[in-house]
Image (tube, rainbow, N blue to C red):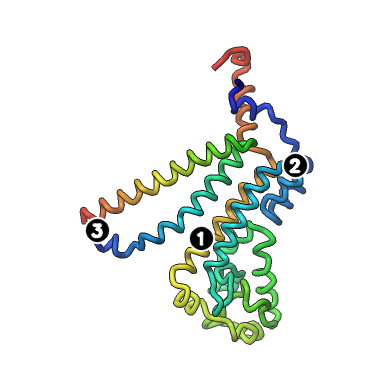
Amino acid sequence: MPNTLETEQEIVVDLKNPFLAGVLAWLVPGLGHFYQGRTAKGLVFFVCILSTFGYGVYLGGNSELGWGRAVYASFRPGQRHLPFLCQIGVGLPAMPALLEAQRAAEGKEPLLGGFMAPPLPVGDPHPGRRMDALSGQPTLNELHRKLHRYFDIATAYTMIAGLLNVLAIYDACCGPVFAENRKEDEEEKPEDSSGTV
Amino acid sequence: MVNILLASTRIKDFWFALPLIVAVSLVYAATRHELMGPILSHALRIGVWIVSFMMMVLVVLLTISWCT
């Protein structure tokens, strides 16, 4: 009976168009792998990453405050939300945050009950249309006070989901890491090719 | 001091780590293999390793709390 690892190493992974696969994998976790015909792995990435992100969105809100409060985009000085740099790694599911940030900057009220909308800024050095648009939204202090530790847990969940998708994107672009290791091993030890381990 | 550490730690919050450990293990293992069999066995090993590491950190923190 062949060793599982040997069987696996015999698989030739057709990456098709790696760039397109990477873009698709970023937009929707697992989509790049579906495009390459790697359905099982695509399903693993899709379920694991999206369920992690979805649970974070659920934890970071409630029916009173609105959902997905831990995912929002804000890069104004003093109100930067750097976790979004990790959260955007999950692709389309985090895009509503960009849409809401853009709407707030244009002075428009948030959509969908404030889903992924930025909180009301406190002590904004440049108050204006953005302040008016977000006047009905909770402040960051209120979010922390009402959601307690769940706000931080939700932030961690959504950040980790985004970072995990970076691994999935790399896998879609370059294939599994084991294949590269095997190639390096063969190049380094050509005399061992006839031997057994 | 140990009592303060344990009191400030909500034991039930540890359950929030479980879905993360499962997801991280599966995704990491999936980036290193192509077949589901090796992926699942590798994920199991990584999951056990992560839990062991977290337990070691907990023991270290409890020891430090106990000593101070």
Q: Residue at x 58, y 67 (%)?
A: A71
Kindly indicate whether the residue at mark 3 contacts the one at mark 2 (C-beta within 8 angstroms).
no
| Mark 1: amino acid | Ala
Q: Please give the residue where the numbered disc 3 appears in the rendered image.
A: B2
Q: Please determine whether, in this image, residue B35 is positioned above or below residue A100.
A: above
Q: Does B28 sit above or below residue A1? A: below
Is residue A120 shown left or right of residue A43? left
Q: Secondary structure at mark 1?
A: helix
Residue A188 position, x and y percent, is 60, 22
SS for callout 2: loop
Q: Viewer-nearest of labels 2 and 3?
A: 2
Residue flagged by tag 3: what amino acid is it?
A: Val
Give the quadrant of the C terminus of chain A: top right
Q: Chain letter of disc 2?
A: A
**Residue beneath disc 1:** A156
Residue situated in front as seen by the camera: A6 or A18: A6
Residue located beneath label 2 in the image:
A37
Total marks placed: 3
Q: CA distance from mark 2 to mark 3?
A: 53 Å
| Residue at horizontal 47 percent and vertical 68 percent from the top | A150
The answer for which chain carries disc 3 is B
Residue at 52% over, 64% down: A155
Counting other residues with Cα less than 10 Å from the Cα at mark 3, is it few (<14), some (14-19), or many (20 or more)? Answer: some
How far apart are labels 1 and 3 at the CA level?
26 Å
Q: Amino acid at mark 2?
A: Gly
